[in-house]
Image (spheres, rainbow, N blue to C red):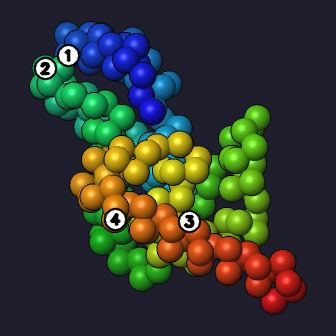
Amino acid sequence: MINQSTKVDDRQLLERLARGDMQALAAIYDAYSGVVYHLLLARLEDDHRAEELLVDVFMALVQRGRGVAQIRDLRAYLLQVARNHAAQAHCKHNHNSPDLAIATVADEPVAEALDSIVVREALAELPAEQAEMIVLKIWHELTFAEIGRILDISPNTAASRYRYGLEKLRTILGESYDGN
């Protein structure tokens, strides 16, 4: 959950960015590039494309100019922009089956588990919206209410996608560990 000091820091960074302070952009990038990148990976097949879109997401923030100071929830804004960019890229390249790739993040047990080849392959078999829920809920520890706001769905929809995704993931992983 986002604490009050994070909101205050985000507000200050956004105000500085609105005034053209690129150091503020660097601080925003440092704070949020990881979660944005992971969401992009959850929506795209290609990690190189995710890296390209990561730059586009932060450029969209800069392009808002002074309007950037009006953003209420910076993380939610960036994740929504990332999701929109990924959807546009997906349609543009006519991918028929979304894949999931997870970047390596050292020193995090959940990230290490998600980064394993077996789990990567299992997540790739899930519908993209279910894989996205698992990444946001487990890896980034967002609540269903936060996920709902970011993705413009109800918290109940987020929870059910997460639950169905976990059930499918368990089934897939169970089969892979059984030697199938």
Above or below 18: residue 155 = below
- Which of disc 1 and disc 3 is earlier in sequence? 1
Question: Label 2: few (<14), some or many (≥20) within 10 Å?
Answer: some
Judge left or right: residue 163 versus residue 24. right
Q: Amino acid at mark 3?
A: Leu
- Which of disc 4 and disc 2 is earlier in sequence? 2
Q: Which residue is mark 1?
A: 18
- Confirm whether residue 97 shows in the render: yes
Question: Would you say the residues marked 1 and 2 are in contact, meaning their CB atoms lie under 8 Å apart?
Answer: yes
Disc 4, SS: helix
Disc 3 versus disc 4: nearer the observer: 4
Q: Which residue is mark 3?
A: 100
Q: Which residue is mark 2?
A: 66
Question: Label 1: few (<14), some or many (≥20) within 10 Å?
Answer: many
- Which of disc 2 and disc 1 is earlier in sequence? 1
Q: Amino acid at mark 2?
A: Arg
